[in-house]
Amino acid sequence: MVILGIETSCDETSVAIVQEDPPYSGSFYVVVNHIASQIARHAPFGGVVPEVATREHLLNLPRLVHNALQDCELTPRLIDAVAVTEGPGLAASLLIGHSYARAFAIAADKPVIGVNHLEAHLFSPFLTHRRPVAFPFLGLIASGGHSILVHVRSWDDYKRIGATADDAAGECFDKVAKLLGLPYPGGPEVEKMARHGNPTRYDFPRSFMQAGNYNFSFSGLKTAVRYFAERHPEVLTDGNMLADVCASFQAAVVEVLVRKTVDAALRTGVPRVLAAGGVLCNNVLRQALAEECRHQGLDLMLADASICTDNAAMIAAVAGGKLAAGIHPRIRADIDPNLSLFARQPDREEADAFRAGREGKDGKPRKGNENRAVYTRRQRGALHPGS
Ligand code: KG4
Ligand code: ZN
């Protein structure tokens, strides 16, 4: 099975081709994963500008699809399905990928599958490890827009264990970096500075650390760094102090993410933890999570840093994983910028709505909904002349 993936939910345009290997194994590998990063276009504004992102997708997407197919010596006919992000993300950016994917699929006469961006992050470690999807597991998604802990019991059976009450972990890295005069995106810059710093020099707050609380709150931590920078403006020019602040801030985020993830895994009784999303590019976090999981006897699967940030390979792989499991997800008629990981799947929703319209509570057809004959306008005209 060969899947073409398209991702345009935020500020990376990405096109990938993944293949099931060996055939019918349910395990996928990345053939190509092209990413046109827009960082340079957004950096002068200190964050993502939605209109700039949309136009970049429009410019980049056709070229990336062409290159991906050419690199693999594939024609659209040799693809089994097209997978595209349908939410959550920036509305206009999502529309570019969604419209392109649907048009491409019609032209190539292939099925098109809508993918939840968060679901793609969640399952991405299986792609890194080239393993078929296995349940159950505890998933941590830590990205620019989300910090979520999910108990995954099977496909489409996701239980929210915790989520952020305010800023996401990546958002907090980005905002703190801005406060400290570091460029966008802040995560990698803070990590770079922190390498030379002392993580115990400053005691920044860790929120919601009571046992059994799996929600996150990072805005207090961000405010603590803001107050620090106001009291010590020299942090912007004193390299050693800046490194210590970055290391101490990073230590606080890492401790919160690791503690809650491992506690949640132990509490839910799953044998395995999966972690992905842009913040999992952070090496201090990766090492701390690996150490704590080993200590607690949990199997840890981390997405490779190359597929932690937004990419189309994870979009294609999650669609492929579902197809391999015999699930045939469809695409929404519209994108959903606020699509939840816990929303019901559209095909189920549609089927239920269809049934609800046709059936009464007893499951029998409603009166008037019994197999009514359907005619074309011409046939009706012949049957009821003058109507
Ligand atoms: O998953 P992603 O590419 O986009 C979303 O779906 O949001 O994540 C981007 C986020 C940004 O906030 C970025 O600062 C953060 O991931 N990030 C990092 C690192 N690399 C990227 N955060 C901490 N340390 C890093 N090395
Ligand atoms: Zn993402």
Image: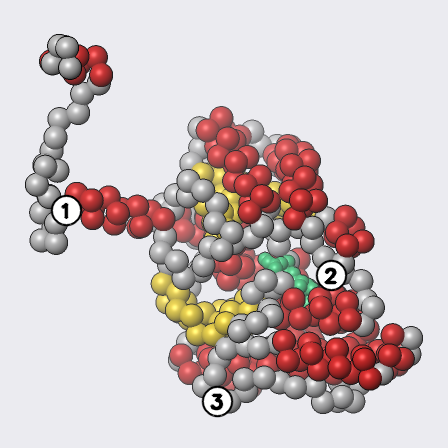
- At a point 12% along the width and 49% down the height, the residue shown is 360
SS of the residue at dot 1?
Answer: loop
Marks 2 and 3 close (CB-CB < 8 Å)? no
Task: State yes or no: Cβ of the residue under disc 2 lies below 8 Å from any atom of ligand 1.
Answer: yes
Amino acid type, callout 1? Glu
Location of residue 264 in the rendering, given as x and y in whole percent from the top left corner: 46, 80
Marks 1 and 2 close (CB-CB < 8 Å)? no
SS of the residue at dot 2?
Answer: loop
Which quarter shows the C terminus? top left
- At a point 80% along the width and 79% down the height, the residue shown is 229
Q: Label 1 vs label 2: CA separation?
A: 52 Å
Q: Left or right: 177 with respect to 165?
A: right
Mark 3 or 1 closer to N-term?
A: 3
- At a point 71% along the width and 66% down the height, the residue shown is 174
Image quadrant where residue 230 sits: bottom right
Which is more toward the observer, 192 or 376? 376
Amino acid type, callout 2? Pro
- Give the foreground label among 3 and 1: 1
Q: Quadrant of ligand 2?
A: bottom right
Q: To which residue does mark 3 refer?
A: 211
Q: Left or right: 284 with respect to 341?
A: right
Q: Tag on residue 185?
A: 2
Location of residue 265 in the rendering, given as x and y in whole percent from the top left corner: 46, 78
